[in-house]
Image (spheres, rainbow, N blue to C red):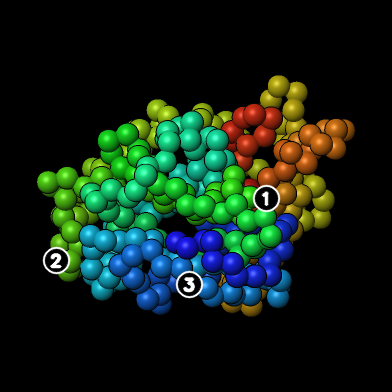
Amino acid sequence: MDVDAKKKNYMSPKMPLDYQQIRAHFEYSKVAMKKHIAISFVILGICSPIFGQILLCLDTPQDNATALRETWDRDELKPLRAEYEEIISTRIWPLKYGDVTNIFGSKLDKKPDHYALPVFVPVMQGMSGLIPEDDKRHTDFYAVGDVGYFQVYYNWDGETIGIAAFYLRTDDKFIPLQSTNDFARRLDWDKARFNSLKRWLDRHLPKLTDLGVVEVSSNEPNRIALGNGKTCIITTQILTRPEMTNDWFSMELTLDSTNVTERMQSRNYKSVSQPGQSIGFTMDGRFFRLTPKLN
């Protein structure tokens, strides 16, 4: 993705877009897929005129676009897609550039030839359209042991993640999806490789403290204990759009501290677009997961 092309897009810096927001606004079946990563400079209104985003298609060099589109809604993919999205939203989004390099090692000099996007991963994704003067946006490709690859599109600050995607390393048993007839065999291959990927991530990603279901309200801030005498303050804002069938809300999470600098540095912004959606965040040097329930 040519993220160095300077296009001024107007977007509030207060709330970055996340993985679930993209899914809430775009249906895969309506998107024209492309063989290689291609950025689409489409600036779309999100909640207000000051919001915008950059859309792109993830690379699917091994597969036929029509076959991918025709198999996208298969019931067999839904639990795998949900599991994958849970990993991205709770384990990957909280990471920053330094965390990524510590976990996955140095970026690769170039993309390998033997990689494939799992058939359950959304091909169309998007990231913040905010491009300030000091734009440090960059895209890096990493190896995930010997099981796959990890691609990260960093936001304008060069530190936080805008888009993240896992690819699987192909082998002599790999089945390219060239038609719907290949679907069953390809899915079996994807499942086996995805299980290997999950085992690798479980061994190498930071450990999470699961805070469970947490009730939040737009009427007043909520507090939740993090352990070690620390408390997180959650401020919730409900966002409404005519085409949305459920409440979509944003949350600001900050450390309860009298130190202004400490509060600012701890700040996390998250959004939730569907019931039961979990989010991950970092605070006080630790990683957490919670499932917000709008009260």
* Horizontal side of residue 28 vs 218, given as left or right: left
Q: Find disc 3 in the rendering and name its residue.
A: 40
Residue 108 percent coordinates (x, y): 37, 42
Which amino acid does the dot numbered 3 rest on? Ser
Reading the image, the residue beneath label 2 is 181
Q: Nearer the viewer, residue 227 or 4?
A: 4
Q: In the structure shown, which secondary structural element does the residue marked by tag 3 occupy?
A: strand
Residue 276, x across and y down, in percent: 54, 52
Label 3 crowd (10 A; few <14 / some 14-19 / many >=20): few
Q: Is residue 140 visible?
A: yes
Q: Nearer the viewer, residue 146 or 173?
A: 146
Q: Amino acid at mark 2?
A: Asn
Q: Residue at x 23, y 43 (%)?
A: 192
Instruction: Answer whether labels 1 and 3 touch (C-beta < 8 Å).
Output: no
- Residue at the extreme top of the image, as rendered: 228
Q: CA distance from mark 2 to mark 1?
A: 43 Å
Which element is circle 1 on?
A: strand
Position of residue 76 relative to residue 30, above or below, is above
Marked residue nearer the N-terminal end (1 or 3): 3
Q: Determine whether, in the image, residue 293 is placed left or right of residue 35.
A: right
Mark 2 and 1 residues: CB-CB less than 8 Å, in contact? Answer: no
Real-space Cα separation, disc 3 to disc 2, in angstroms: 31 Å
* Callout in the foreground (1, 3): 3
The residue under label 1 is 269
Q: Residue at x 26, y 73 (%)?
A: 66
- Residue 143: name its quadrant: top left
Quadrant showing the N terminus: bottom left
Vertical side of 274 occupied by 45: above or below: below
